[in-house]
């Protein structure tokens, strides 16, 4: 069911991921998968193109909210109302809108390391970022709630959550999220929860939709990550409070980063018709996670991989090898990885590895990284 792309097909299908590397280099950096999208999505998009559907999207959400609500009920037992969805162009555009239109002014708390555009979203909305480090050495890499409370007490009014977490692969427990929600309520803090990776929760972990513990939050999500369709440009804010929703729906055209008609069509198909494909994808990632663990044990025994609970992005701590920029040396040996310093400026010795590829490529990725480390270690 998961259709792997050959190198040539991947270069044509994924212009950013594969176009940004020289021929022969394996790209395992940006979060895109080396697989074709699910067939129901391809069919819906092809049918739309054949109909000549390439106009402005209609007013309203074109059924995206109802489709998402069916998905949320089936996968997480979450009865989110269909009218809670406000469409937007991308998750990052949605986060920006939430910060500007719903969240009060004041500093924004962001657990770090973080997805790099989180820093940009905070900066372009004129807010101060308050980083709260997630201890990567702790087994759970949990949030330090005492530090979060300190930030709230000092005036922070927004918490930007990534749930599940990119790049650490954490799937926050209900207890962790409830504790955060209690603090947010006490200090009148708005939580914006980016849940784009939620459908990619792996066996052994359970995803908790943040709105089920904090009704005042704003969730931003999209089918784009789990179904490998970021190019069609469609995402959604999910908001339970009618006044917040009205503010978001009233965003003027230049502010709202309008979605595309293809984004809505593909999103509806993904949330409605692709459960079997998603189950096969999660199985593939479960296998790739074991494969990567075994490969590391053989070829890079001193690497520490964070337990991967969700996402297809593994976080490796390579500090014991004494190389400040392992992604830099890996690129010289034919594999492009995400440098840890992209996610936390100044952080040395870490890389993010995208395992959404074939078993063969994953083996080559680890072999090349191991050769890079062996030839560069002091
Ligand atoms: C946590 C997270 N949020 C947002 C995005 C980007 O989403 P979009 O392209 O819809 O802005 C990504 C992409 O990898 C991501 O990992």
Image: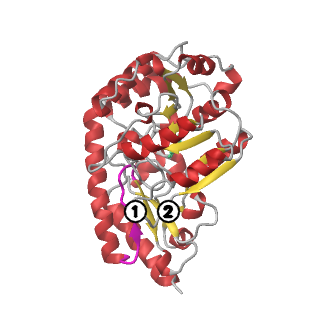
- Within the image, what quadrant is residue 189 found in? top right
Q: Is mark 1 on a helix, strand or loop?
A: loop
15 is higher (above) or lower (below) than 246: below
Image label count: 2
| Image coordinates for residue 14, horizontal then vertical, percent | 48, 46
Camera-side residue of 275 and 130: 130
**Mark 1, residues whose alpha carbon is within 10 Å: few (<14), some, or many (≥20)?**
many
Q: Are marks 2 and 1 in contact (CB under 8 Å)?
A: no
145 is higher (above) or lower (below) than 232: below
Residue 363 is a magenta residue = no
Q: How far apart are marks 2 and 1 (CA)?
A: 11 Å
Q: Is residue 163 visible?
A: no
Residue in the image at 42% along x and 34% along y: 213
30 is higher (above) or lower (below) than 378: above
User: Left or right: 363 with respect to 238?
Assistant: left
Q: Which mark is residue 135?
A: 2
Camera-side residue of 112 and 363: 112
Q: Name the residue under label 1.
A: 306
Location of the N terminus (image quadrant): top left
125 is higher (above) or lower (below) than 143: above
Give the mark, 2 or 1, whose residue is nearer the N terminus.
2
Query: Which residues fall within the magenta stretch?
Result: 300-312
Residue 309 is a magenta residue = yes
Single out the residue that lies furthest toward the bottom. Answer: 378
């Amino acid at each position: 069911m998961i259709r792997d792309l050959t190198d040539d097909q991947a270069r044509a299908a994924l212009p950013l991921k594969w176009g940004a590397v020289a021929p022969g280099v394996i790209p395992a950096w940006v979060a895109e998968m080396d697989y074709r999208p699910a067939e129901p999505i391809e069919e819906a998009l092809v049918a739309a193109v054949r109909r000549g559907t390439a106009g402005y999207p209609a007013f309203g959400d074109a059924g995206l909210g109802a489709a998402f609500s069916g998905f949320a009920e089936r996968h997480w037992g979450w009865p989110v109302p269909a009218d809670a969805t406000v469409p937007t162009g991308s998750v990052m555009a949605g986060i920006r809108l939430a910060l500007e239109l719903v969240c009060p002014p004041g500093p924004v708390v962001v657990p770090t390391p973080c997805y790099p555009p989180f820093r940009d979203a905070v900066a372009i909305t004129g807010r101060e970022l308050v980083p709260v480090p997630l201890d990567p050495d702790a087994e759970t890499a949990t949030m330090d709630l005492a530090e979060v409370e300190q930030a709230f007490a000092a005036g922070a009014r927004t918490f930007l959550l990534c749930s599940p977490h990119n790049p650490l692969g954490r799937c926050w427990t209900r207890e962790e999220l409830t504790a955060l929600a209690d603090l947010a309520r006490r200090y009148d803090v708005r939580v914006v929860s980016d849940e784009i990776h939620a459908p990619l929760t792996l066996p052994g972990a359970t995803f908790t939709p943040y709105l089920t513990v904090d009704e005042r939050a704003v969730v931003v999500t999209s089918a784009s990550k789990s179904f490998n369709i970021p190019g069609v440009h469609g995402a959604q804010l999910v908001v339970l409070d009618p006044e917040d929703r009205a503010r978001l729906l009233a965003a003027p055209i230049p502010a709202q980063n309008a979605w595309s008609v293809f984004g809505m069509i593909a999103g509806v198909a993904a949330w409605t018709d692709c459960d079997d494909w998603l189950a096969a994808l999660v199985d593939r990632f479960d296998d790739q996670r074991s494969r990567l663990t075994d490969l590391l044990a053989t070829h890079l025994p001193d690497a520490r991989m964070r337990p991967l609970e969700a996402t297809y992005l593994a976080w490796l701590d390579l500090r014991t090898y004494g190389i400040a920029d392992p992604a830099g040396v890996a690129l010289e040996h034919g594999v492009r990885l995400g440098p840890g310093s992209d996610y936390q400026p100044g952080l040395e010795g870490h890389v993010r590895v995208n395992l959404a590829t074939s078993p063969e490529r994953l083996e080559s990725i680890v072999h090349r990284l191991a050769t890079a480390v062996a030839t560069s270690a002091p």
